[in-house]
Image (spheres, rainbow, N blue to C red):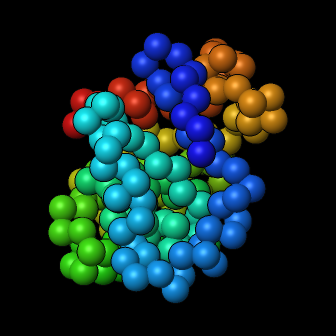
Amino acid sequence: MPILNISENLDLVPSSIDLLGAEMEIVSKIGKEQILHKLLKPVRSKYDYIIIDCPPSVGLLTVNAMVASDTILLPLQGEYFAYKRVDRLLGIVKEVRENLNDTLDIGGVFITQINPNRILTKTIVEQLIEDLQEKMFDTKIRINVALAEAQLQGQSIFEYAPESNGAKDYEMLVEEIFSK
């Protein structure tokens, strides 16, 4: 996959349709959980940070990302089913740490698609804060149509709508991540 230089301090390796079959292709390979880790080795020293965006399901590609990572940030939707999945997700992180990457750490959990006017959302947020305590970021990402529109336009939220709530929320989240 090609590395695209997006700006002076940002390179991107975009996803492609080829990833659809990648999991099927590597499932029978020896060391299948280590493939991404090995691919990243030659370029690690070139970057201060390598961010791997994963699908919401936990499959072999996501496990590869966990094995290749030092720290993971977990975005969780402020919804009931996302909340119910947290224990399973934390269990998978623990399994990866115990069996494949003993340096893996959860850097934090942040909540996305927050609708602050919903009682259910408030209840879920309160429960997540109680359950995950110091791992929870204070910043919450509110539901914002500009975030979806930016994706459609193939732009970052900072290019598409820099004054939107989505841009402001993500900017606050980045500041919070770097202050920890």
Vertical relation: 117 (above or below) 9: below
Percent coordinates x, y for residue 44 in the rendering:
30, 41
Residue at 67% in and 42% down = 143
Residue found 61% across the figure and 76% down from its top? 25
Instruction: Residue 176: tell me if it is visible.
Output: no
Please tell me whether residue 50 is drawn above or below residue 120 in the rendered image: above
Say if 132 sits above or below 49 in the image. Answer: below
Q: Quadrant of residue 69?
A: bottom left
**102 left or right of 27 in image:** left
In depth, the one of 62 and 108 nearer the eye is 62
Q: What residue sits 54% from the left and 34% below the top? A: 3
| Numbered circles on residues, count | 0
Q: Residue at x 36, y 68 (%)?
A: 34
Q: Quadrant of residue 90?
A: bottom left
**Quarter holding the C terminus?**
top left
Residue 63 image offset from top left, x and y in percent? 43, 70
Q: Please name whichever residue, 72 or 8, is drawn nearer the observer in this view of the structure.
A: 8
Residue 136 lies, in percent from the top left, at 34, 52
Res. 170 visible in picture? yes
